[in-house]
Amino acid sequence: MSFKKQDIYKALETITEPGEGKSLVENNNVTNVVAFGNEVIVDVTISNPTLQAKKKIEGEIKKAIHSQVDESIDVKVNVKSAPKQKKEENSNLIKGKEIPNIQNIIAIASGKGGVGKSTITANTAITLAKMGFKVGVLDADIYGPSMHLMFDVEKEKPLSVNINGRSKMKPVENYGVKLLSLGFFTNPDQAVIWRGPMASKALNQLIFDADWGELDFLLIDLPPGTGDVHLSIVQAVPINGAVIVSTPQNIALADAKKGVAMFQQESIQVPVLGIVENMAYFTPDELPDNKYYIFGKDGAKHLAEDIQTKFLGEVPLVQSIREAGDVGHPVALQVNTPLEKAFSDITKEMVSELLKRNANLPPTEVVRITTMSGCSAVKK
């Protein structure tokens, strides 16, 4: 039996700590490797302090060395949990871990539930894909995932693919958009009852244990409100900007204002690209020239002016939007319709604001605006 320390490291490169996205070697989890005779001692430090996590890593290390180097090696593994690092008290910006090959990450949020945030996310993603971009959607609404329904992939499951010796999730794709959602992994008849840390861990795995490939845009559909999931997202990934969705009535606007305030916190500082007003007005089929402002008029537009944020546009209250979402065929897929134009205009405004964000603030990726088939577009 003859092996080198490099052989051991090569075997360890195939092991990933859940939620980290990099191998033990890449992530500097392996602190020391000692090899003499037929014995190998591996010292590893991981972020998860639980006994279950330590036992799992120990087992994976032994299995990797035995299968890839020599099964007769006597492997001893010392697993320690990394001490929690104190955050700098005066840090002005929480920086997330970059996701390889993803150019721009945009969070779609709302302070209140039921305002159509997921509908805006799905149709914006499809509009971007129609413009020629590579687009992905992460359904981070872990307690009420719906993207798998809106994209008509309810019965699909993400496949496992091997990337550089590591197992990754391959997002489900439809309408030119890549999608990952907790809805793929949960029983639709059962409620998801998780505490904050469990939810955060699940999101980290969806983000970093996935093979997103090359994306121009990753849209993150956040749950309503402000809480653990939102903080986990802004801490986990470098978000370029956020879009806030609201309806015109005062109670929704009050919550939308809280959503804006969350992203503008000194410890977060994610630029708000603008506000979208959903269910802005109702026009019955028999009276196509009439507009009825059921929830109030121009509420989100006035809010955008008050807090000096861009008003990205409005979407009317139309039955076909709800019906299209229910059958998994969003209205943005239509051609030459008023609704397609509404979502196209909103998306162009969002892209324009993203350009300004990347030009004026420390960018995740420098972008420039071009023209593709008459549509504004962002490219690296």
Image (spheres, helix red, strand yellow):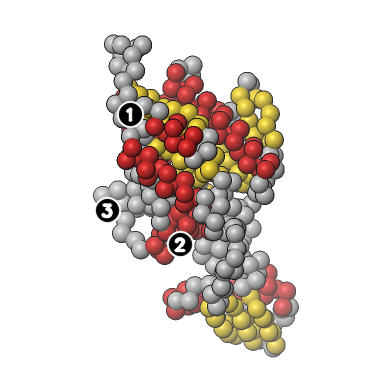
Q: How far apart are marks 1 and 2 (CA)?
A: 40 Å
Q: Of all residues shown, which one is farthest toward the front?
A: 306
Q: Residue beneath label 2, please?
A: 201
Q: Earlier in the sequence, mark 3 or mark 2?
A: 3
Q: Mark 1 or mark 3, which is nearer the start of the sequence?
A: 3
**Does the image show residue 10?**
yes
Q: Which residue is drawn at 45% across and 62% down?
A: 201
Q: Nearer the viewer, residue 43 or 292?
A: 292
In the displayed structure, 168 sits above or below 173; it is below
> Hey, what amino acid is under mark 3?
Gln
In this rendering, position of residue 1 left or right of residue 120: right
Which three-letter amino acid code belongs to the residue tagged 2?
A: Lys
Return the residue at label 3.
190
The residue lying toward the viewer, choosing from 144 and 285, is 285
Which mark, residue 32? Answer: none
Mark 3–mark 1 distance (CA, rounded to whole Å) = 36 Å
Considering the numbered disc 3 on the image, is that residue within a helix, a strand or a loop? loop
Q: What element carries label 1?
A: loop
Q: Position of residue 211 (x, y in %)?
A: 56, 50
Q: Distance between the residues labelled 3 and 2?
A: 20 Å
Give the side of residue 232 with respect to residue 148, left or right.
right
| Quarter placement of the N terminus | bottom right
Q: Residue at x 59, y 58 (%)?
A: 93
Q: Mark 1 points at which residue?
A: 296
Judged from the image, the secondary structure of the residue bearing numbered disc 2 is helix
Front position among marks 3 and 2: 2
Give coordinates of residue 66: x percent, y percent: 59, 76
Mark 1, other Cα within 10 Å: few <14 / some 14–19 / many ≥20:
some
Mark 3, other Cα within 10 Å: few <14 / some 14–19 / many ≥20: few
Disc 1 residue type? Gly
